[in-house]
Image (tube, rainbow, N blue to C red):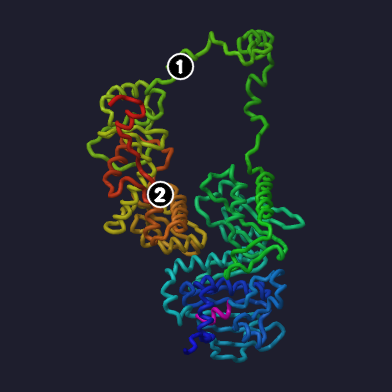
Amino acid sequence: MADIINLLPDNIANQIAAGEVIQRPASAVKELLENAVDAGATEIHLIIKDAGKELVQVIDNGGGMSETDARMCFERHATSKIQTIEDLFSIRTMGFRGEALASIAAVAQVELKTRKRGTDIGSYIEIDNSVVRVQEPCQTAEGTSIAMKNLFFNVPARRNFLKSNAAEMRHIVDEFIRVAMAFPQLQFTLTSNNQQLFHLDKGSLKQRIIAILGQHYNARVVNVKESTDYMNVYGFVGKPETAKKTRGDQFFFVNNRFIKSHYLHHAVMNAFADIIPADSFPLYVLFIDVNPEHVDINVHPTKQEIKFDDEKVMYAFVQAAVKHALAQFSVTPTLDFDLDPSIQALDAVSKPFTEQQRTESTHSPLYKSFSQAHQAHVIDRSNSNLKNWKDLYQPAAENESYTTAYSEEPETETRTAITYESAQPATASAIDERWQETSKDLKVPVQVHQQYVLSQIKSGFILIDQHAAHERILYERYQRALQEAPVATQQSLFPQTLQLPPADAAIVTEMLPELQALGYDLEPFGNHTFVVRGTPADIQTGNDQATIEGLLEQFKHFSHELKVNRREHLIRSMARNNAIPAGKVLSAREMQNIIDELFACTMPNVAPGGKFTFISFKLTDLARMFERNQ
């Protein structure tokens, strides 16, 4: 029988290996930037064209390479970072495997120019499909310039799996930010399609955080700094008001290497447990310095997943460091024993206590009950209001729900859309009168705790979640807008300028056609800025920036949670962001409109995310619960 096992050619083996290391343009960006850092560069310039599909180029002023090293760097497992197996346990560099450049050369066309410091002539190499096409001397600046062109030119199936340019650009920006955040002492520049997106000058860590995440964080971050013989933790965490509903501004670095750790993230979340909502995520940029012997970074090809030899110690120390920082800067809740100045000005404090007042107070029943021995627990039944317990159940005047449901409002022939305007509370007499008029018609909806709408149906009644119901209504409205007629736009009298972080600006650029169909009039204004000239007609105008930022947060949330297309992400995000929230007071007309529009939907029983919009209660169930005879 003939032998069937063959040794793969180098170019095929390299392409297979490249699939683990170079998954998209952002993977190459990460590897090339980390190589520039390891080369001792102080200035690093990243150039991108066509979201990295046409060109990814990194230029640095590092140590450069000799002619032999320039050729050897494209060989598999060729590295200058480690020599022996013991070196794996003392790694301080970003790279060490010697796979990145070999993987890039296997799936792209690569041009390398490099000159070692102190030499007059550099080296130029062209390589593609793991084959060196040109190698010759050249004139170039000290340092290295490496250009990766036409990614996956020889693996078209892989190229077809790449996402849109805006989506790939978001991944590139993420990788750029992670490396730039880890090394604030270096200068980083990012240029995309001849437009400069970032120019980050050398500075402190806080300056780098503000430059990347936005100026509004300047006074809203707290310094973290704790040191022990085992490890050091330093960096910044955001104050509670910076917490968002989605992840995105969370960065962990171990020995300056960006990592993803659900375990350490949980430690930070525990430190914030009592001061932010349970469904919110705080901002943090935290660095852990630890002896490399206690860390295993050789777990995953991306080197973003690592293992600690004692995770419990790391968890406890990170949590304690964040808690200490929040307490030190008076961010955590504390008891305040300082008197309010306005209290000092009250007559009871500022004026003397006369003898007549003293006599009157000491003869009061309240004084006696607390001053006489064994009397503090006694209830004075002669003045007790317990006999009037039935007054607790007075219907309309004291009941907030009825106040909301039966407030006076003008009668009109035509039912209007939901306006989200709070009804003005009516007087007690007006409420009583309205209650008398409507008590015969129990189909008038009632709001319960400003979260639910109760309405009678033939077989019993239903309890509607006002937010989930309105989310379903808006979702189907936006679906029709994208398929049929666009949503009407309400033009702003004074257009607003919207300044966004680069990653968010890439998302908005990607979504512009859909946003315009849904009623947003947005226009790019350069440098991550947009001009907002109009918003959907059915959305309250005012703080357009907050509205769009909320939409972006919801979009990023759905992008993490769901595997659906971009349009579906967008309309779900808009529906959730614009739906009336729990706690919003509704008039009777608004509640009735929610009911009518909900049951006109194609799927009225569930919100887009799958939550129930209403629950029905049948008369037979009620009779059973109250043990009534049928």
Asked whether 425 falls inside the magenta stretch, the response is no
Q: Is residue 133 above or below residue 530?
A: below
> Which one is nearer the viewer's eye here, 245 or 356?
245
The residue tagged with tag 1: helix, strand or loop?
A: helix
- Front: mark 1 or 2: 1
Q: Residue at x 41, y 28 (%)?
A: 400
Q: Residue at x 39, y 51 (%)?
A: 609
Within 10 Å of disc 1 (Cα), the crowding (few <14, some 14-19, many 20+) is few
According to the picture, the residue beneath numbered tag 2 turns out to be: 576
In x, y percent, where is residue 80? 68, 79
Within 10 Å of disc 2 (Cα), the crowding (few <14, some 14-19, many 20+) is many
User: What amino acid is labelled 1 in the image?
Assistant: Trp
How far apart are the alpha carbons under marks 1 and 2?
43 Å
Asked whether 106 falls inside the magenta stretch, the response is yes
- Would you say 25 lies left or right of 254 here? left
> Which one is nearer the viewer's eye here, 338 or 578?
578
Earlier-in-chain disc, 1 versus 2: 1
According to the picture, the residue beneath numbered tag 1 turns out to be: 389
The C terminus: image quadrant: top left
In x, y percent, where is residue 312? 67, 53
User: What amino acid is labelled 2 in the image?
Assistant: Arg
- Would you say 131 lies left or right of 358 here? left
Q: Is residue 577 above or below residue 153?
A: above
Q: Residue at x 32, y 28 (%)?
A: 623
Magenta span: 100-107
In x, y percent, where is residue 120? 68, 88
Question: In the image, which disc is placed on residue 506?
Answer: none
Question: In the rendered image, which quarter is residue 391 located in?
Answer: top left
Total numbered labels placed on residues in the image: 2
- Would you say 120 lies left or right of 612 here? right
- Would you say 19 lies left or right of 492 here? right
> Which one is nearer the viewer's eye here, 464 or 309?
309
